[in-house]
Image: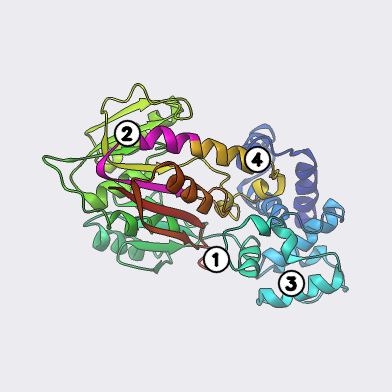
Amino acid sequence: MRFQSYFNTSVSLIKMFDGSVPLVHFLKQYFSQHKKHGSKDRKFIIQLCYCFYRLGHSLKDLTIEERLKASIYLSNNDAEEWKILFDDTWDEWDIDLTKRINFIQKKYPSFSLQNIFPWNEELSETIDLRSFAVSHLIQPDLFLRIRPNKEKATIEKLQSNKVSYKQLSSTCLSLLNSSKIDLILNIDDDVVVQDYSSQRVASFLQLITYKVQPTTQLWDCCAASGGKSILAKDVLGNIELTVSDIRSSVLQNLKHRFEKSGIKKYQSFVSDLTKSASNIQHPTFNIILCDAPCSGSGTWSRTPEQLFFFKEEKLNEYAALQKKIISNTISHLAKEGYFLYITCSVFKKENEEAVDFIHQQFPSLQLIKKELLKGYEMKADTMFAALFKKI
């Protein structure tokens, strides 16, 4: 009966949720107002709500109850606790997701993997459409980036606390998303919580060979929480760091994060880069890191409600926003400097077409490398990065 109650509560919450705020905030507010739900109750209800949105735009012809059952079936490899919700017309759970997909296709002829993410014509060309669609049915992993000289201590802490992990490289670890690490590791000191694809941006930074004395000036122009700045500091070493964002509250959070990470010397300012960057203290920078605001479509397996509520017309708004930011920041790039453009998007309008825009508007910039950083086969985000050099 408990699981039927979880199911019913989740249906009620899905009917209430309109996508105007992130699902995590909506659920947090609900649980703060309804103290009757214990920690185990919250865990299962949250799981069900996220399952529902993992179907994206597929099976929208079903009732919420039917759709939620289909999503539970598809998004869980081992679902012993949920079997009470299903009658004999459902196949036994199989750990093989492909078999579960085949069953849903037979049970509901309207089901289509393509409809999970229906904007296939807008995707970057190198994406495998089936693999990408299927990835939305699977909860991504938690990824950690080990900071310099912290590998041995980090591994020892995880092993002594019997935390399961996979080591993908000397600096990258993957763990189950539910892993509790806050009390085991010093976040931002020992490790940075950073997606696998985001960590791969290091390969672009390693291509930068610009040398000036006494230090290299780097501007992280859309710094947000500062994860890319910490990565740049770890990879490039002796850089003079400047960070900016449109939101002062974000820069305040970044300040606390930098304190934990050991970054003490940097400059910061608030700026709306769609208008101008007139309050920049340095006229030019050797490196500009532009992690541009975008649709976030490469991260929707983590936030599937955004996939469900996304409107295609927003794509043109994001593309226009990115072009304004690109134009207002590149003007501050020094000769022989590097411009690194990054998104967490899978849409070509935000990725390859942004590269085309830079080629057309700034002929002095030479493309060094561009790549869609595919994370959908690694239970990770998908990102895009392009590195330019001013000649």
On whether residue 158 falls in the magenta region, the answer is no
Q: Gap in Å between the C-alphas at discs 3 and 2?
A: 51 Å
- Residues shaded magenta: 324-342
Q: Nearer the viewer, residue 160 or 135?
A: 135
Circle 4 sits on which residue? 314
Q: Nearer the viewer, residue 217 or 335?
A: 335
Q: Which residue is rendered at x = 71% and y = 66% of the image? A: 74
Mark closer to the chain start, 3 or 2? 3
Mark closer to the chain start, 2 or 4? 4
Q: Which mark is residue 101?
A: 3
Q: Which residue is rendered at x = 32% and y = 28% of the image? A: 268
Q: Gap in Å between the C-alphas at discs 2 and 4?
A: 28 Å
Does residue 48 appear to the left or right of 164 in the view shown? right
Circle 1 sits on which residue? 126
Mark closer to the chain start, 3 or 4? 3
Crowding near the residue tagged with mark 2, few <14, some 14–19, many ≥20 C-alpha atoms within 10 Å: some
Location of the N terminus (image quadrant): bottom right
Relative height, residue 2 to residue 100 (above, below): above
Does residue 292 appear to the left or right of 51 in the view shown? left
On whether residue 335 falls in the magenta region, the answer is yes
Which amino acid, by three-letter code, is at mark 1?
Thr
